Amino acid sequence: MTIRVAVNGYGTIGKRVADAVALQPDMKLVGVAKTRPSFEAGRAAAKGFKLYLSGGGALEPFHTAGIPIAGRIEDLVREVDVVVDAAPEKVGRENAKLYKEAGIRAIFQGGEKPDVAEVSFNALANYEAARGKHTVRVVSCNTTGLSRAASVLTSRWPIEYWQATIVRRAADPAESNRGPINGILPTFQLPSHHGPDVRTIFPQLPIATLAVVVPTTLMHVHVNHVQFTTPPRDAAEMLAGFRGTPRFRIFAPWEGVDGTPQVMEFARDRGVGHQDMMENVLWENGVRLDGQNAYFFQAIHQESIVVPENIDAIRAMFDLAPDAAHSIAITDRTLGIPAP
């Protein structure tokens, strides 16, 4: 079975998801939709992706730019089985009406509220929950990172309490309209929304989160304190759990990766996707165990971490793989993410 896929919204996430869909053996990218012309729209056309007009966009600017348009989003949704909505935050909820009327399945991103879909999704944590669903929400980058870590920890050691402080990037690299800032900005939603969002995946997880925004565009960093009821034997056992799980990259001290600049330089050298880092990043010397208390850092590349999750969500919705492990293996192999 080959699933016909549309991507509505061709920005930071949409263009990456479209490329990922095009690589899958059981999916076909039918087209992508964008509101206005840009270099990204030009790149889509250069790649041979059919481009459709979305939202209230006008045809004339595309014609002026010399970018061919195959039709409108209403035409595209009639040709597909599922649409990945990568529109700006809150726009996906409006687009949901169109998808429902067209009778197709839809995947939304973490910028939408959980009730936009039947289930919130993370491949390592709750793949089975999305099986056969018509609407799925792939949780945000930070929630994806925390949920992946939770899938490792909760499956091995009972957790009494988890406190995560999220050091957030101020903007994505291309978002010049959002910066620069010269300061550290506390997020005055206390606790932050990330903890409740993680509980849409792990309803019973006792996690609380805080967030601050800092002047960087590279990645987010999570500062985690986990108190276990029954702890691991040592930090090495914790590291083995992460290291043996897909979509984690553990850096050793000898690799000289002091922080996010070197992580992204590693990603550029590796050349996966858009020179992305789709894995949770941890450091061997950034994991400590003190009795029942564990401390660890992890870095999250906000531009790409949800890309493989969108692919696995499609596979779950259409029952294309026997389980999460099979889907993750296919996705990661096609995207160039190393297996554990």
Image: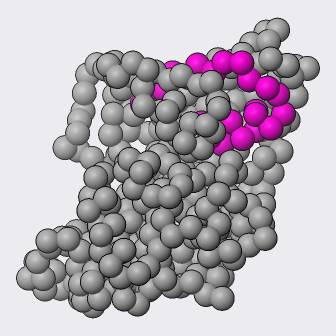
Q: Which residue occupies the foreground of this view, 3 or 23?
A: 3
User: Is 136 left or right of 295, judged from the image as shown?
Assistant: left
Q: Is residue 310 left or right of residue 326?
A: left
Question: How many dots with numbers?
Answer: 0
Question: On screen, 249 above or below 47?
Answer: above
Q: Nearer the viewer, residue 258 or 190?
A: 190
In magenta segment, residue 278: no
* Residue 166 position within the rendered picture, expressed as x and y whole percent measured from the top left: 48, 26
Residue 82 against residue 155 in the figure, above or below: below
The image quarter containing residue 238 is top right
Query: Who's the residue at 19% across and 43% down the image?
Result: 177
Horizontal and vertical percent for residue 194?
Answer: 47, 33
Give the x, y percent position of residue 44: 36, 77
Placement of 21 over or under 224, stated as above or below: below
Res. 203 visible in picture? yes
Tell me which segment is drawn in magenta. 146-168
Q: Residue drawn 35% across and 82% down?
A: 102
Q: Is residue 84 above or below residue 143?
A: below
Which residue is found at the position 78% from the left and 47% from the top?
245
Does residue 263 appear anywhere in the picture? no
Quadrant of the rendering where the N terminus is positioned? bottom right
Residue 103 screen position, x and y as percent:
41, 81
Q: Residue furthest right?
A: 233
State the scheme by which the image is colored.
one colour
Q: Which residue is drawn at 71% across and 18% down?
A: 160
